[in-house]
Amino acid sequence: MSIYPLVPLGEILYRIIGGGTPSKEVSQYWNGSIPWCSVKDMKEGCYSISETQDSITEEGLENSASNLIPAGTVVTSTRMGLGRAFINQVDMSINQDLKALIPNSKIDNIFLLWSIIFQKDVIEGLGTGATVKGIRLETLKSIKIPLPSLPIQQKIAAILSAYDNLIENNLKRIKLLEEMAQITYEEWFVRLCFPGHESTPINPEGLPERWESISCYDAMEVMSGGTPKTSMEEYWNGNIPFYTPKDAVDSSYIFETEKYVTELGVRKCNSKLYPKDTVFITARGTVGKVNLAGQPMAMNQSCYALAGKVGISIYFLFFAVKASVAAFKGASNGGVFNTIVVDTFRYLPFRKPTQNLMQKFEGFVSPILSEVSNLTRQNQRLREARDILLPRLMTGVIDVESYDPAQLLKEAA
C-alpha cells in the first residue's frame, strides 16, 4: 500500500499522442533522417532511447499517421511489450503501437516515466488479445498511480534517474572500449596494418607470409544447443542462464537471460553448460548477433556456441566472427526464418594469422574486455538495486527526505 494518494493516470495527462507507419511499398518514405520508433527498439530495462533501427523521411511522416514526438517525452507501448516506457533523447516519430504521454501540471515528467515502470505488471495484466496483447487507452488511463507532492515527485525521480545516468555513462564507456578493440582487429587483420607488416612478405594468396586461408569450420568448433521440455517444471527456473536469440545484446557480454534452467534441464536437452567467454552466435530468425558469455550458460537450438581450433584464441575468434557478421547474414537462408546451418561454416573463409600475432592481439584486448565485463556486471547490479528501490520509493516506504542516494549508488556499483 502507498502512503501517497492514488490517482488515475488519465487525470494527470494533458494529452496522448499516437503514431503510425508509412507505407512500406513507398521507398521514398523510408531511410530518411527522422528516427522511427517501434516496440523492437524498446529493450527491457532501458528507459532512454536516442537511436532507432528504422528511420523515415519528411515525406513519410507527412503521409502517415505517425507523429514527430519532441525530445524529453514519455513514450509507452499499448500493444506488445506492455508496460515498457522510455524518454526519447532526440525528436523521433513513433508507430501505432506506441503512445506519447504529455503530462499536465500535477505530475513531474520524469516521475511519470517511473510511474509507468512501477505499474508494469498491472499494465501487462490488463492486456487483452489472443496472439498479441494490447491495452485500450481508456483502460490505460484508468490505472491508478501514487501521486505525492511535486517536490517529493522530483526527489524520487532524481534518485531513480541517478541510477540510470550511471548506467548510461557505463554504456558509453563500454561502447568506446568495444569500438577501440574492433577497430584494432580490423586494422591488423582486415587492412593488414599489423605491427611489423612493413617487413612481412605477401604470399601468392595475397596474405602475409605464414598466414593461412581456411574455412570457418576449420578455425572453430561449432556446437549446437537445445531446449528442455517446457512441460517439465523441474527443468526450469534454476540458476543457469539460458541463452536464446531474444537475449542477444549489441554489446559484447551477456550476463542475464529471459529464462533460466536447472542442471537437470541442461542434461535432458541437446545442450551443455558452456563456460564463461564462450562465443555465441544467433543462427535462426535473428541471425548474426555475437556475444560472449559473461558466466556459464546453456543455449537453445537457434544459436551456436563457438570455440577456437588449431590455436585460435577465444578473443581473436570473437572479433573475427563479429567482423564476419555480414557474410553470415548473407549466407543465411530459409522460408519463414533466415537460418545459418553448420555447413555455412564450411564454406565461409577465415584468415588465420600467425600464432605470435594472435597472442599480441589477445594481450591488447584482454584488459579491454575485462573492463567491459566489469562495467556490464556493474550495470546489472545497478539495475537490480534500482528495481528494488522503485516500489519502496513509489509507495513511501523510504523517506526521501532522509535518503542518501550517493551512498546507495556507491554500494550498488
Image (spheres, grey):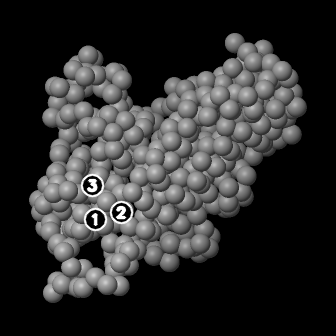
Q: CA distance from mark 2 to mark 1?
A: 6 Å
* Upstream in sequence: badge 3 or badge 1: 3
Q: What residue is at 42 percent from the left and 64 percent from the top?
A: 182
Give the residue type that dot 2 points to.
Lys
Q: Amino acid at mark 1?
A: Asn
Q: Which residue is mark 3?
A: 313
Q: Vertically, is 38 above or below 261?
A: below
The answer to whether residue 346 of the structure is visible from this angle is yes
Q: Which image quarter holds the N terminus?
A: top right
Front position among marks 3 and 2: 2
Determine the residue positioned at 33% across, 44% down: 277
Mark drawn on residue 356: 1
The residue that label 2 is drawn on is 360
Cβ atoms at labels 3 and 2 below 8 Å apart: no
Snapshot quadrant of residue 151:
top right
Q: Quadrant of the C terminus?
A: top right
Label 3 to label 1, Cα distance in Å? 11 Å
- Residue drawn at x 40%, y 34% as measured from the top left: 258
- Answer yes or no: do the residues labelled 2 and 1 have beta carbons within 8 Å? yes
Rendering coords of residue 82 (x, y %):
53, 37
Residue located 67% across and 37% down the image? 163
Q: Secondary structure at mark 3?
A: loop
Question: CA separation, marks 3 and 2?
Answer: 11 Å
Q: Which mark is residue 8?
A: none
Q: Answer few, some or many: residues within 10 Å of disc 3's Cα (few below 14, many 20 plus, some between 14 and 19).
A: some
- Residue type marked 3: Ser
In the rendered image, residue 251, in percent from the top left (x then y), is placed at 46, 52
